[in-house]
Amino acid sequence: MISSLGKIVYSTAKKSQPTAIESAFKHEFIRHTEKAAQNLDQDMVKRQEIFSSVLSPLVKGLENVTEMIQRLKGKNGISEKMVRKINGIFNEPNKADQIFDKFLVGKGAAELIDDGFGARIKINSKTFTNKKGETVDTIDEIFGRILKGQKKGKLQIKEIESYHGKGFSGYINEDLKNTLALNDTKVFSKTKDAGYTRVNMILEIDGKRIELQIGGSDLLGNKEHIFHNIRENKKIDFSKYTDQEKETANKLIQSYKKILTNTEGKKVFESYLNDCWKYDKECFDKGVAMNLDGMPKVQDAFKNFLNGNPQLKKAYRKYITNIKQNIPTNRIVKIKEGDKIIQYNLENLNHSKNKMNPILDIRVFANLPA
Protein backbone atom coordinates (compact mmCIF):
# COMPACT_ATOMS: atom_id res chain seq x y z
CA MET A 1 0.00 0.00 0.00
CA ILE A 2 1.59 3.29 -1.11
CA SER A 3 0.99 6.27 1.16
CA SER A 4 -0.74 9.38 -0.18
CA LEU A 5 2.54 11.23 0.32
CA GLY A 6 4.36 8.59 -1.70
CA LYS A 7 1.90 8.89 -4.59
CA ILE A 8 2.17 12.68 -4.65
CA VAL A 9 5.97 12.71 -4.57
CA TYR A 10 6.44 9.91 -7.07
CA SER A 11 3.91 11.18 -9.61
CA THR A 12 5.38 14.70 -9.48
CA ALA A 13 8.97 13.50 -9.67
CA LYS A 14 8.14 11.13 -12.52
CA LYS A 15 6.76 14.02 -14.59
CA SER A 16 9.92 16.01 -13.93
CA GLN A 17 12.47 13.29 -14.64
CA PRO A 18 10.66 10.32 -16.33
CA THR A 19 13.70 8.48 -17.73
CA ALA A 20 15.90 8.87 -14.68
CA ILE A 21 13.09 7.98 -12.25
CA GLU A 22 12.03 4.92 -14.25
CA SER A 23 15.52 3.51 -14.76
CA ALA A 24 17.22 4.48 -11.51
CA PHE A 25 14.99 3.79 -8.56
CA LYS A 26 11.29 3.44 -9.38
CA HIS A 27 10.44 0.56 -7.05
CA GLU A 28 12.90 1.52 -4.32
CA PHE A 29 11.64 5.08 -4.49
CA ILE A 30 8.02 4.05 -3.86
CA ARG A 31 8.94 1.66 -1.07
CA HIS A 32 11.12 4.16 0.75
CA THR A 33 8.67 7.01 0.25
CA GLU A 34 6.18 4.94 2.23
CA LYS A 35 8.81 4.44 4.92
CA ALA A 36 9.63 8.16 4.83
CA ALA A 37 5.98 9.09 5.34
CA GLN A 38 5.70 6.79 8.37
CA ASN A 39 8.90 8.15 9.87
CA LEU A 40 7.75 11.69 9.25
CA ASP A 41 4.46 11.13 11.10
CA GLN A 42 6.35 9.74 14.11
CA ASP A 43 8.86 12.55 13.84
CA MET A 44 6.16 15.23 13.96
CA VAL A 45 4.81 13.83 17.25
CA LYS A 46 8.27 14.09 18.78
CA ARG A 47 8.75 17.64 17.49
CA GLN A 48 5.43 18.73 18.97
CA GLU A 49 6.62 17.45 22.35
CA ILE A 50 9.79 19.52 21.89
CA PHE A 51 7.67 22.58 21.11
CA SER A 52 5.93 22.31 24.47
CA SER A 53 8.96 21.46 26.57
CA VAL A 54 11.76 23.56 25.03
CA LEU A 55 10.45 26.20 22.60
CA SER A 56 7.43 27.59 24.46
CA PRO A 57 9.48 28.53 27.57
CA LEU A 58 11.62 30.82 25.36
CA VAL A 59 8.87 33.44 25.46
CA LYS A 60 7.40 32.77 28.91
CA GLY A 61 6.58 36.02 30.70
CA LEU A 62 7.23 38.23 27.68
CA GLU A 63 4.09 40.34 27.57
CA ASN A 64 4.80 41.83 24.15
CA VAL A 65 5.05 38.45 22.44
CA THR A 66 1.62 38.23 20.87
CA GLU A 67 1.87 34.62 19.82
CA MET A 68 4.12 31.55 19.84
CA ILE A 69 2.71 29.09 17.34
CA GLN A 70 3.54 25.74 15.81
CA ARG A 71 3.84 25.61 12.05
CA LEU A 72 3.43 22.21 10.45
CA LYS A 73 4.19 21.83 6.74
CA GLY A 74 1.37 19.99 4.93
CA LYS A 75 1.87 16.84 2.88
CA ASN A 76 1.74 18.75 -0.41
CA GLY A 77 4.43 21.14 0.79
CA ILE A 78 6.57 18.25 2.01
CA SER A 79 6.17 16.32 -1.23
CA GLU A 80 7.06 19.36 -3.34
CA LYS A 81 10.22 19.95 -1.31
CA MET A 82 11.17 16.27 -1.57
CA VAL A 83 10.75 16.45 -5.33
CA ARG A 84 12.99 19.52 -5.50
CA LYS A 85 15.62 17.65 -3.48
CA ILE A 86 15.33 14.60 -5.74
CA ASN A 87 15.53 16.68 -8.91
CA GLY A 88 18.65 18.22 -7.42
CA ILE A 89 20.27 14.81 -7.83
CA PHE A 90 20.08 15.18 -11.58
CA ASN A 91 20.99 18.88 -11.61
CA GLU A 92 23.95 18.45 -9.25
CA PRO A 93 25.37 14.90 -9.61
CA ASN A 94 27.95 15.51 -6.85
CA LYS A 95 25.06 15.59 -4.34
CA ALA A 96 23.47 12.36 -5.55
CA ASP A 97 25.15 10.04 -3.04
CA GLN A 98 24.30 12.32 -0.13
CA ILE A 99 20.60 12.53 -1.04
CA PHE A 100 20.26 8.86 -1.95
CA ASP A 101 21.85 7.86 1.35
CA LYS A 102 19.41 10.01 3.30
CA PHE A 103 16.33 9.19 1.31
CA LEU A 104 16.77 5.52 0.48
CA VAL A 105 18.83 4.39 3.48
CA GLY A 106 18.20 6.89 6.25
CA LYS A 107 14.96 8.30 7.63
CA GLY A 108 13.78 9.77 4.36
CA ALA A 109 11.67 12.88 4.64
CA ALA A 110 12.46 13.34 8.32
CA GLU A 111 16.08 14.07 7.36
CA LEU A 112 15.45 15.83 4.06
CA ILE A 113 12.87 18.34 5.30
CA ASP A 114 14.42 20.81 7.75
CA ASP A 115 11.30 22.95 7.96
CA GLY A 116 8.63 20.23 8.10
CA PHE A 117 7.93 21.36 11.63
CA GLY A 118 8.60 24.85 12.87
CA ALA A 119 7.61 27.54 15.30
CA ARG A 120 6.94 31.22 14.88
CA ILE A 121 7.36 33.94 17.50
CA LYS A 122 5.35 37.09 16.83
CA ILE A 123 6.42 40.25 18.69
CA ASN A 124 4.49 43.50 18.73
CA SER A 125 7.22 45.89 19.94
CA LYS A 126 10.97 46.22 20.17
CA THR A 127 11.18 46.49 23.98
CA PHE A 128 9.32 45.49 27.12
CA THR A 129 9.52 46.35 30.80
CA ASN A 130 10.70 43.52 33.07
CA LYS A 131 9.70 42.91 36.69
CA LYS A 132 12.50 45.20 37.89
CA GLY A 133 11.06 48.08 35.88
CA GLU A 134 13.92 47.93 33.37
CA THR A 135 13.44 48.42 29.63
CA VAL A 136 14.70 45.30 27.83
CA ASP A 137 15.18 44.58 24.14
CA THR A 138 12.81 41.71 23.29
CA ILE A 139 15.00 40.11 20.60
CA ASP A 140 18.04 40.24 22.91
CA GLU A 141 16.03 38.56 25.68
CA ILE A 142 14.82 35.74 23.43
CA PHE A 143 18.30 35.06 22.06
CA GLY A 144 19.70 35.22 25.58
CA ARG A 145 17.33 32.39 26.53
CA ILE A 146 18.27 30.44 23.41
CA LEU A 147 21.99 30.75 24.23
CA LYS A 148 21.34 29.61 27.83
CA GLY A 149 19.55 26.59 26.44
CA GLN A 150 22.52 25.87 24.19
CA LYS A 151 24.98 26.11 27.08
CA LYS A 152 22.86 23.68 29.11
CA GLY A 153 22.82 21.24 26.17
CA LYS A 154 19.06 21.53 25.61
CA LEU A 155 19.44 22.77 22.05
CA GLN A 156 22.00 23.68 19.41
CA ILE A 157 21.86 26.56 16.95
CA LYS A 158 22.67 25.18 13.49
CA GLU A 159 22.19 28.33 11.44
CA ILE A 160 20.73 31.85 11.67
CA GLU A 161 19.63 33.96 8.72
CA SER A 162 18.62 37.58 9.20
CA TYR A 163 16.60 38.92 6.27
CA HIS A 164 15.67 42.56 5.76
CA GLY A 165 14.69 44.96 3.01
CA LYS A 166 16.52 47.86 1.37
CA GLY A 167 17.03 51.00 3.42
CA PHE A 168 16.30 49.55 6.86
CA SER A 169 17.80 47.10 9.33
CA GLY A 170 16.71 43.62 10.30
CA TYR A 171 15.81 42.33 13.77
CA ILE A 172 19.37 41.38 14.74
CA ASN A 173 21.60 44.39 15.49
CA GLU A 174 25.40 44.48 15.47
CA ASP A 175 25.72 44.07 19.26
CA LEU A 176 23.64 40.89 19.16
CA LYS A 177 25.66 39.62 16.18
CA ASN A 178 28.83 40.09 18.22
CA THR A 179 27.29 38.32 21.23
CA LEU A 180 26.31 35.39 19.04
CA ALA A 181 29.77 35.33 17.45
CA LEU A 182 31.33 35.01 20.92
CA ASN A 183 29.15 31.91 21.32
CA ASP A 184 30.46 30.42 18.04
CA THR A 185 27.28 31.32 16.18
CA LYS A 186 27.45 33.29 12.94
CA VAL A 187 24.52 35.29 11.58
CA PHE A 188 24.10 35.35 7.81
CA SER A 189 22.46 38.62 6.79
CA LYS A 190 20.78 39.12 3.45
CA THR A 191 18.97 42.05 1.85
CA LYS A 192 15.78 41.03 0.04
CA ASP A 193 14.60 43.07 -2.95
CA ALA A 194 10.95 42.65 -1.98
CA GLY A 195 11.68 43.64 1.64
CA TYR A 196 11.06 40.33 3.47
CA THR A 197 12.19 40.94 7.07
CA ARG A 198 12.46 38.03 9.48
CA VAL A 199 14.93 36.00 11.51
CA ASN A 200 14.94 32.37 10.36
CA MET A 201 17.00 29.81 12.23
CA ILE A 202 17.44 26.08 12.39
CA LEU A 203 17.70 24.58 15.88
CA GLU A 204 18.60 21.01 16.71
CA ILE A 205 16.80 19.72 19.78
CA ASP A 206 17.06 16.12 20.94
CA GLY A 207 18.38 15.17 17.50
CA LYS A 208 15.49 16.87 15.67
CA ARG A 209 15.93 19.86 13.38
CA ILE A 210 13.30 22.56 13.85
CA GLU A 211 12.86 25.88 12.08
CA LEU A 212 12.25 28.87 14.35
CA GLN A 213 11.09 32.17 12.86
CA ILE A 214 11.06 35.48 14.73
CA GLY A 215 9.49 38.75 13.61
CA GLY A 216 6.85 41.38 14.10
CA SER A 217 3.37 41.46 12.60
CA ASP A 218 2.36 38.48 10.48
CA LEU A 219 0.16 40.62 8.24
CA LEU A 220 2.85 40.80 5.58
CA GLY A 221 4.69 37.60 6.43
CA ASN A 222 1.66 35.41 5.89
CA LYS A 223 -0.13 37.21 3.09
CA GLU A 224 2.83 38.30 0.94
CA HIS A 225 3.88 34.64 0.87
CA ILE A 226 1.51 34.14 -2.07
CA PHE A 227 3.93 36.14 -4.25
CA HIS A 228 6.84 34.01 -3.03
CA ASN A 229 4.95 30.85 -3.99
CA ILE A 230 4.22 32.22 -7.47
CA ARG A 231 7.88 33.14 -8.02
CA GLU A 232 8.95 29.66 -6.88
CA ASN A 233 6.28 27.98 -9.05
CA LYS A 234 4.68 26.47 -5.96
CA LYS A 235 1.02 25.48 -5.85
CA ILE A 236 -1.33 27.86 -4.06
CA ASP A 237 -3.51 26.19 -1.44
CA PHE A 238 -7.04 27.55 -1.88
CA SER A 239 -8.66 25.15 0.59
CA LYS A 240 -9.31 27.96 3.14
CA TYR A 241 -10.65 30.40 0.56
CA THR A 242 -14.27 31.27 -0.11
CA ASP A 243 -15.36 31.44 -3.75
CA GLN A 244 -15.10 35.23 -3.68
CA GLU A 245 -11.64 35.14 -2.09
CA LYS A 246 -10.53 32.59 -4.67
CA GLU A 247 -11.72 34.90 -7.46
CA THR A 248 -9.79 37.83 -5.93
CA ALA A 249 -6.68 35.67 -5.47
CA ASN A 250 -6.77 34.49 -9.09
CA LYS A 251 -6.97 38.10 -10.32
CA LEU A 252 -4.07 38.94 -8.01
CA ILE A 253 -2.03 36.02 -9.34
CA GLN A 254 -2.67 36.86 -12.98
CA SER A 255 -1.73 40.51 -12.45
CA TYR A 256 1.45 39.53 -10.62
CA LYS A 257 2.46 37.02 -13.31
CA LYS A 258 2.20 39.80 -15.89
CA ILE A 259 4.50 41.95 -13.78
CA LEU A 260 7.08 39.17 -13.65
CA THR A 261 7.40 39.35 -17.44
CA ASN A 262 8.23 43.07 -17.26
CA THR A 263 11.68 43.73 -15.77
CA GLU A 264 11.01 47.30 -14.69
CA GLY A 265 7.46 46.50 -13.57
CA LYS A 266 8.84 43.75 -11.33
CA LYS A 267 11.31 46.20 -9.80
CA VAL A 268 8.52 48.72 -9.16
CA PHE A 269 6.33 46.16 -7.37
CA GLU A 270 9.26 44.79 -5.34
CA SER A 271 10.02 48.37 -4.33
CA TYR A 272 6.39 48.71 -3.19
CA LEU A 273 6.57 45.54 -1.07
CA ASN A 274 9.89 46.76 0.35
CA ASP A 275 8.20 50.00 1.45
CA CYS A 276 5.43 47.97 3.11
CA TRP A 277 7.95 45.88 5.05
CA LYS A 278 9.81 49.07 5.99
CA TYR A 279 6.63 50.52 7.47
CA ASP A 280 6.02 47.25 9.35
CA LYS A 281 9.53 47.37 10.86
CA GLU A 282 9.20 51.08 11.76
CA CYS A 283 6.02 50.29 13.71
CA PHE A 284 7.84 47.49 15.52
CA ASP A 285 10.76 49.77 16.45
CA LYS A 286 8.40 52.48 17.72
CA GLY A 287 6.23 50.00 19.63
CA VAL A 288 3.04 51.05 17.86
CA ALA A 289 0.43 48.84 16.25
CA MET A 290 0.72 48.48 12.49
CA ASN A 291 -2.44 49.37 10.60
CA LEU A 292 -3.40 49.15 6.96
CA ASP A 293 -4.27 52.85 6.72
CA GLY A 294 -0.63 53.76 7.25
CA MET A 295 0.67 51.33 4.65
CA PRO A 296 2.03 52.67 1.33
CA LYS A 297 -0.44 52.63 -1.58
CA VAL A 298 0.31 50.62 -4.69
CA GLN A 299 -0.94 53.53 -6.84
CA ASP A 300 2.08 55.52 -5.58
CA ALA A 301 4.56 52.71 -6.28
CA PHE A 302 5.76 53.97 -9.67
CA LYS A 303 6.31 57.53 -8.41
CA ASN A 304 8.08 56.27 -5.28
CA PHE A 305 10.27 53.97 -7.36
CA LEU A 306 11.46 56.87 -9.54
CA ASN A 307 12.04 59.03 -6.45
CA GLY A 308 14.34 56.32 -5.12
CA ASN A 309 16.27 56.15 -8.40
CA PRO A 310 17.17 59.79 -9.21
CA GLN A 311 19.16 59.12 -12.41
CA LEU A 312 16.42 56.89 -13.80
CA LYS A 313 13.89 59.58 -12.88
CA LYS A 314 15.98 62.15 -14.74
CA ALA A 315 16.11 59.90 -17.82
CA TYR A 316 12.38 59.26 -17.66
CA ARG A 317 11.57 62.97 -17.40
CA LYS A 318 13.78 63.71 -20.41
CA TYR A 319 11.99 60.99 -22.37
CA ILE A 320 8.53 62.35 -21.46
CA THR A 321 9.60 65.92 -22.27
CA ASN A 322 10.79 64.81 -25.72
CA ILE A 323 7.45 63.13 -26.37
CA LYS A 324 5.48 66.22 -25.29
CA GLN A 325 7.61 68.43 -27.55
CA ASN A 326 7.25 65.98 -30.46
CA ILE A 327 11.00 65.45 -30.52
CA PRO A 328 11.86 62.15 -32.30
CA THR A 329 13.16 59.77 -29.65
CA ASN A 330 13.59 56.10 -28.87
CA ARG A 331 13.56 54.29 -25.54
CA ILE A 332 17.33 54.63 -25.09
CA VAL A 333 17.93 57.85 -23.16
CA LYS A 334 21.44 59.20 -22.56
CA ILE A 335 22.20 61.06 -19.34
CA LYS A 336 25.50 62.70 -18.43
CA GLU A 337 26.83 61.59 -15.04
CA GLY A 338 30.07 63.40 -14.26
CA ASP A 339 32.48 62.66 -17.10
CA LYS A 340 30.44 59.69 -18.31
CA ILE A 341 27.43 59.30 -20.56
CA ILE A 342 25.08 56.60 -19.17
CA GLN A 343 22.40 54.98 -21.32
CA TYR A 344 19.03 54.07 -19.79
CA ASN A 345 16.77 51.63 -21.58
CA LEU A 346 13.16 52.68 -20.96
CA GLU A 347 11.66 49.97 -23.16
CA ASN A 348 9.31 48.71 -20.44
CA LEU A 349 9.11 51.87 -18.40
CA ASN A 350 6.20 54.20 -18.94
CA HIS A 351 3.48 55.56 -16.70
CA SER A 352 0.62 53.53 -18.16
CA LYS A 353 2.32 50.15 -17.99
CA ASN A 354 3.83 50.62 -14.57
CA LYS A 355 0.86 52.14 -12.80
CA MET A 356 0.14 49.12 -10.63
CA ASN A 357 -3.19 47.33 -10.82
CA PRO A 358 -5.21 48.27 -7.65
CA ILE A 359 -5.72 44.52 -7.06
CA LEU A 360 -2.04 44.43 -5.99
CA ASP A 361 -2.50 46.83 -3.08
CA ILE A 362 -1.79 45.33 0.34
CA ARG A 363 -5.28 46.36 1.45
CA VAL A 364 -6.62 43.75 -0.98
CA PHE A 365 -4.34 40.78 -0.38
CA ALA A 366 -4.14 41.41 3.38
CA ASN A 367 -7.74 40.22 3.63
CA LEU A 368 -7.01 36.85 2.01
CA PRO A 369 -6.47 33.73 4.16
CA ALA A 370 -2.85 32.97 5.09
Image (cartoon, rainbow, N blue to C red):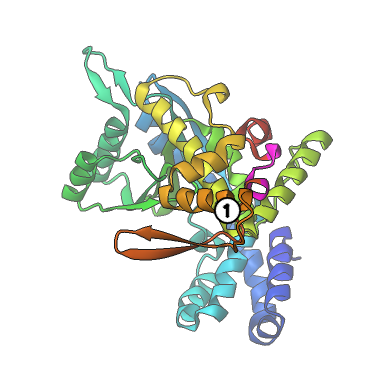
User: Would you say residue 122 is visible in this rendering?
Assistant: yes
Which quadrant: the C terminus?
A: top right
Please name the residue shown 58% across and 42% down the image. Answer: 224
> Which residue is denoted by mark 1 in the rendering?
322
199 or 111, nearer to the observer: 199
In the image, is residue 222 part of the stretch drawn in magenta? Answer: no
Please name the residue shown 61% across and 50% down the image. Answer: 325
User: Would you say residue 49 is visible in this rendering?
Assistant: no
Q: Given the image, on which type of amino acid does mark 1 rest?
A: Asn
Q: Is residue 10 left or right of residue 86?
A: right
- The picture places residue 336, in percent across and down from the top left corner, at 38, 59
How busy is the neighbourhood of tag 1: few (under 14 within 10 Å), some, or many (20 plus)? some
Q: Residue furthest left?
A: 182
In the image, is residue 354 part of the stretch drawn in magenta? Answer: yes
- The picture places residue 159, in percent across and down from the top left corner, at 34, 54
154 or 213, nearer to the observer: 213
The magenta stretch is 352-359
